[in-house]
Image (tube, grey):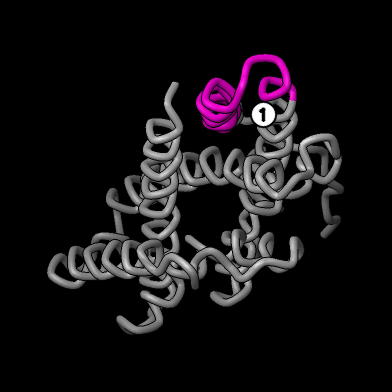
Amino acid sequence: MEPGQIFDIVFYMEIVGTIAFAASGAIVGIERGMDVFGVCVLGVITAVGGGMIRDVILGNIPGALVKPVYVAVAVSTALLVFAGFYFRQGLLRGKAGLLYDRVMFVMDSVGLGIFTVMGVMTGIQNGYQDNSFLLVFLGTLTGVGGGLLRDMMAEVPPYIFVKHIYACASLGGALSCVYIYHSFGQIPAMLISSVLVILIRFLAAYYRWNLPRVKKEL
């Protein structure tokens, strides 16, 4: 595959992930009663926050500042989501609340899968292809970092700690990405591992998988 084709695939995957995470951030902001500015900020933080933390760890200028297209896409997505809810009041109540949960779940799952593999690939591009531990860490951080910042800013329990299998799905996808990359190359690693993360999330939701927790006694 030509380098230009690989660049196009990576770019489009990043855009899809940006849209997915920005939408999930915007929906959380709307649910928390934020104004349009707050909704946009939460959308942007969710979309690029994990990647910015990753880049700082790697000693790079955050990619979102070098390529503002991702911020622009995140803001546009957040505005569209806000407009949809603004002109259709009550979408988060009643039966629509179930739809909200499903949309939030799908958006988070897609974003998680894409940004997990992007984190791994960024580590590889920075010359750490032989440091599997660092690559897995960067992948997981990129996947869950934005959502963690979103939930902290919205003052809600972090999604990664309370909803099904989340961080573990990212961890599994990062491990898969590292292994497949060394065996079959970049594109198979990105596509297969992204789908794996999403599949784990869907299976966890369907079968109600959760990590063990201590139940509080009343």
Q: Nearer the viewer, residue 61 or 91?
A: 61
Residue beneath the point at 83% across and 49% down: 215
Q: Give x and y (percent) for residue 68.
A: 40, 69
Q: Give x and y (percent) for residue 131.
A: 85, 39
Q: Quadrant of the N terminus?
A: top left
In the image, residue 121 above or below residue 94:
above
In the image, residue 101 above or below residue 48:
above
Question: Would you identify the image quadrant in which residue 209 lies?
Answer: top right
Q: Is residue 121 left or right of residue 134?
A: left
Residue beneath the point at 24% across and 60% down: 91
- Residue reaching furthest left? 87
**SS at circle 1:** helix
Regarding residue 140, the answer to whether it shows in the image is no
Residue beneath the point at 64% across and 63% down: 148
Question: Would you identify the image quadrant in which residue 184 lies?
Answer: top right
In the image, residue 64 above or below residue 11:
below
- Residue reaching furthest top? 183
Q: Give x and y (percent) for residue 147.
A: 57, 59
Q: Is residue 36 magenta?
A: no
Regarding residue 117, the answer to whether it shows in the image is yes
- Magenta residues? 179-203
The residue to which callout 1 is attached is 177
Q: Nearer the viewer, residue 199 or 132?
A: 132
Dot 1 amino acid type: Cys
Q: Is residue 218 left or right of residue 38?
A: right
